[in-house]
Image (spheres, rainbow, N blue to C red):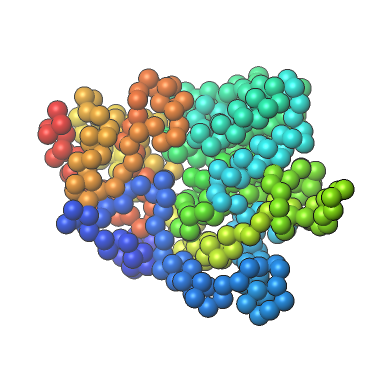
Amino acid sequence: MKEKIEKIRKDFPILATQVNKKPLVYFDNAATTQKPSIVIDTITEYYSKYNANIHRGIHFLSNFVTDASEKARETVREFINADTVEEIIFTSGTTESINLVAFSFGETFIVKDDEIIISEMEHHSNIVPWQMLCERKDAILRVLPFNDAGELEIDKLSELINPKTKIVAVAHVSNALGTINPIKKIIKIAHKSNIPVLIDGAQAAQHIKVDVKELDCDFYAFSGHKSYGPTGTGILYGKKDILEKMTPYKGGGEMIAKVSFEKTTYNALPFKFEAGTPNYIDSIALAKALDYITELGLDNICKYETELLEYATRELKKIDNLKIIGEAEHKSSVISFIIDGIHPSDAGTLLDQMGIAIRTGTHCAEPVMQHFGISGTLRASFAFYNTFEEVDYFVKSLNYIIPILK
């Protein structure tokens, strides 16, 4: 993989950009990844040659793009090894996928005093929808804590589970800490009590091989734009038997079988949860992104990104007064850190002047910051197109700006 990086980088046009007259070093991949030419070209091609609304026409363009859209669904199914395309729902991203489950599962299965378990390290997208559900249904939210290394205290999960527990929702990988959670173990514990589990895979699907059958998760959500695909695309996988019981999330065209003023009956899966004209061209482009990842090989990607993470971690630890937040044994390619006496946004602003793009703040994970008693961190997040030389430049730049800000 390492020897192929320069060739891979040429597939991403934006990496040739200069920022403040310096080569772009893009270390903000946890927020969104850059897009290879195959994704960009697919969007241009389909809007230029084939655009027509899908599932509703008898003409060539509609049939052509409908076929391409459903082939994209099959690509997603293969990517996560789901049983059937009926279990693959196109959404606008992880956020909508989780909101879909929180609403539809909640309306179907949650009643007063029922309990929902999430973890302390969740992104706001896997906190707020469940809080909203609890407010609607007068249910109770329980929180599985993590320790100061950034690892979930799994032994406490069984203590939280009781006959009122109706669902567990947890991140595969923490966006703020980089922790890879033992989700297979979490799922096994929950399933002992017949409790379904939703996995937020926004930070995982592009880094780690996901096999939903092997995991035996009940729901899995991830975003297209974090997986080298277009913004406004996402996936919700759900086990067919649960999805069939759930009430639809949104009403409108396509999600219906028959409409009258007396009664509406709903469409079959997955269309029951895809009201209105979908973002079909971007979904087709998302499939191209997943094909690109598959061709590189997720095992190869994981190995290279782990080497990059370990190297960056060692080098950053050499900097005086720099503290890494989250040092779990198993991590994905995210490093959050603080520097004594320096506000993250000040450091981030100066790094931007040197062409380095990182993220600063709470990363939509305020409870994580509250756990450590800090207001925010600097976060460097890596992708397979990043290089060891970029890490060296990043460390050198930090050593340059720290005396300026002290």
**Which of 306 and 98 lies nearest the eye of the viewer?**
98
Q: Is residue 209 in sight in this rendering?
A: no
Q: Residue furthest left?
A: 404
Q: Position of residue 279 (x, y in %)?
A: 57, 60
Q: Residue at x 29, y 47 (%)?
A: 357
Is 340 situated above or below 335? above
The quarter of the image holding the C terminus is: top left
**Which of 390 and 130 lies nearest the eye of the viewer?**
130
Q: Residue furthest right?
A: 262
Q: Residue at x 53, y 78 (%)?
A: 49
Q: Is residue 118 in sight in this rendering?
A: yes
Indicate left or right for 375 with 201 as reference: left
Q: Position of residue 20 (x, y in %)?
A: 18, 53
Q: Position of residue 346 (x, y in %)?
A: 22, 34
Q: Position of residue 356 (x, y in %)?
A: 25, 48
**Which of 87 and 230 lies nearest the eye of the viewer?**
230
Quadrant hosting residue 369: top left
Q: Residue at x 39, y 52 (%)?
A: 383
Figure label count: 0
The quarter of the image holding the N terminus is: bottom left
Q: Residue at x 56, y 51 (%)?
A: 92
Indicate left or right for 379 with 70 as reference: left
Q: Residue furthest bottom?
A: 60
Is 6 situated above or below 181? below
